[in-house]
Amino acid sequence: MKRKKKTLAERKETVKYWRDKADILFSELERKTVGHCQICSKLGLARKGDGAMIKGLHIHHIIERDWYRYRYRRNNTIVVCVGCHGSMANYRNRSCSAHGSLIAQDLFYAIAWDKFPEKKEFYELHKPEGKTEKDENGHVVVYKSAYYKEIFEALNANKT
Ligand SMILES: [Zn+2]
């Protein structure tokens, strides 16, 4: 059976719609504010269109993105160049990267913790157990679209 395409109004009710919007805005604001790789200092390049100096920069999440409660916390993210991020196959062999070999990750975090003790502190305080967030009864925590919508609107309101 062919599934009917969702209307915009219907899409706006979904988690994905607001989570994607919050993800994009959070990443863009962080990259714009910082403007360079916080590990190796490489500068962002001008993006086509508005010229924002954010091209070639990523956001690395220290505690994985699937822990939604930490997903939009500045202390849980580091602005990185694609090389230092190491999340793409061509950059896997770097001697220092967030997703590289264990040695590369050690070097990445040695630099990160040295430069940003507040991020280290945040990580040590919140470092979770396991891959997914669970409540005190052991149930996987699911955030509704309103949670992401609220985050998106708060980020948007502070936008300069
Ligand atoms: Zn870098």
Image (cartoon, rainbow, N blue to C red):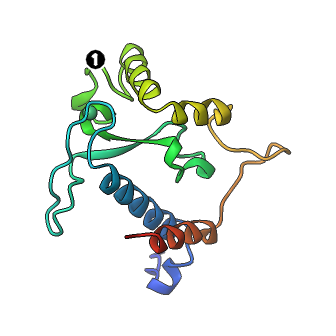
Pick the front one: 106 or 12: 106
Q: How many marks?
A: 1
Side of 22 where 111 appears, left or right? left
| Up-down relation of residue 118 to residue 1 (above or below) | above
Left or right for 119, reference 41: right
Beta carbon at label 1 within 8 Å of ligand 1: no
Which x, y percent locates residue 160? 37, 70
Q: Is residue 25 above or below residue 130?
A: below
Q: Is residue 14 above or below residue 30?
A: below
**In front: 60, or 130?**
60
Residue drawn at 26 percent across, 43 percent down? 36
Task: Give residue 94's position: percent from left, percent from top.
Answer: 25, 21
Could you tell me if residue 13 is visible in this image?
A: yes
Residue under the image location 48 percent in, 70 percent down: 17
Question: Which residue is painted at 39% across and 23% down in the image?
Answer: 111
Does the rendering let one see residue 86?
Answer: no
Residue lying farthest right? 137
Using the rendered view, name the quadrant where residue 100 is placed.
top left
At x 66% / y 36%, what residue is drawn? 126
Residue 45, image x, y percentages: 16, 50
Q: Is residue 89 left or right of residue 113?
A: left
Q: Which residue is mark 1?
A: 95
Q: Quadrant of ligand 1?
A: top left
The amino acid marked with disc number 1 is: Ser
- How far across and down, in percent of the image, does residue 14 sit? 55, 72
Q: Secondary structure at mark 1?
A: loop
Neighbours of disc 1 within 10 Å: few (<14), some (14-19), many (20+)? some
